[in-house]
Image (spheres, rainbow, N blue to C red):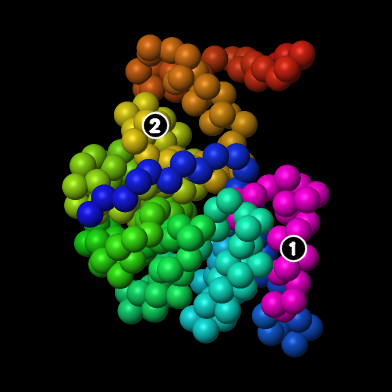
Amino acid sequence: MAIPRNNIHGLIAATFTPMTADDEINLPVIGPYVDYLVKVQGVKNIFVNGTTGEGISLTVEERKLVAEEWIKQGKDKLDQVIVHIGSLSLKETKQLVSIVSNARIVNVVVVVVTDALVKFLQEVASAAPNLPLYYYHIPELTGVFFNMEELLDGIEKKIPTFQGLKFTSSDLLDFGQCVYKYKDKFALLYGKDEVRTFSALLINRFYRSNMEPCSILVSALASKRTQVRFPGRTKA
């Protein structure tokens, strides 16, 4: 059964996992961490146990503890808590999703290292039928160079709870096609810091132009000087 679209907007902080000097999870730090993000940085959306938080390097029990604490401390303070539950093991992924299935502010995101991508996502979605599901596309780390435009084509019929992507790849053509075709249907979160400014320029042009994304990319890449415009100034 389909669920309402979850509109994520604003900045999303990829959180670090606090550790003690003895390499244990430092849970008491998470409460002040939430307050710092909300009150000082003005950020009310977080991404827990992702690559920044080194979730894959933690045990399943540690990942549960971290996710539970962020959910607890973020209640009535954060708008969205996105929890990465991906694992090399489908069983472990299902174990992780079980701890967040009843939390109001939680979304789940999965990074997959198998070519049987859609089937894997269907299995995960079946374990969390009431939670928004996002796919974490980071092929430089997973080795899964699956075309995201093809993945999104009709996926809502196969996985009704599917809500979008975290796209962390330098393949701007693929991302541009996703935005061009699916920006009104799915949340498309871009996470490749190294090329974010350039991608923002291109996506802005997608919204403002009737050109095909391929044409925009070719014209931008072929240009000898690409101008990035900021309020009140222009930087060549």
Find disc 1 in the rendering and name its residue.
33
Who is closer to the viewer here, 98 or 25?
A: 98
Rendering quarter of residue 224: top right
Q: Earlier in the sequence, mark 1 or mark 2?
A: 1
User: In the drawing, what numbered circle is on residue 89?
Assistant: none
Residue 152 image offset from top left, x and y in percent: 28, 42
Element at badge 1?
helix
Look at the image and tell me whether residue 231 can be seen: yes
Find disc 2 in the rendering and name its residue.
183
Residue 40 image offset from top left, x and y in percent: 80, 49
Residue 20 image offset from top left, x and y in percent: 76, 81
Compute the Cα span from label 1 to label 2. 32 Å
Who is closer to the viewer here, 161 or 110?
A: 161
Amino acid type, mark 1: Tyr
Q: Is residue 10 left or right of residue 147?
A: right
- What residue sits 72% from the left and 52% below the top? 38
- What residue sits 38% from the left and 59% below the top? 131
Answer whether residue 16 is magenta in the image. no
- What residue sits 55% from the left and 39% below the top? 9
**How many numbered marks have been drawn onto this rendered protein structure?**
2
Element at badge 2?
loop
Who is closer to the viewer here, 227 or 12?
A: 12
The magenta span reads 26-46
Rendering quarter of residue 174: top left
Q: Is residue 37 left or right of residue 133?
A: right
* Category of crowding for the residue at label 2, using alpha-carbon neighbours closer than 10 angstroms: few (below 14), some (14–19), many (at least 20): some
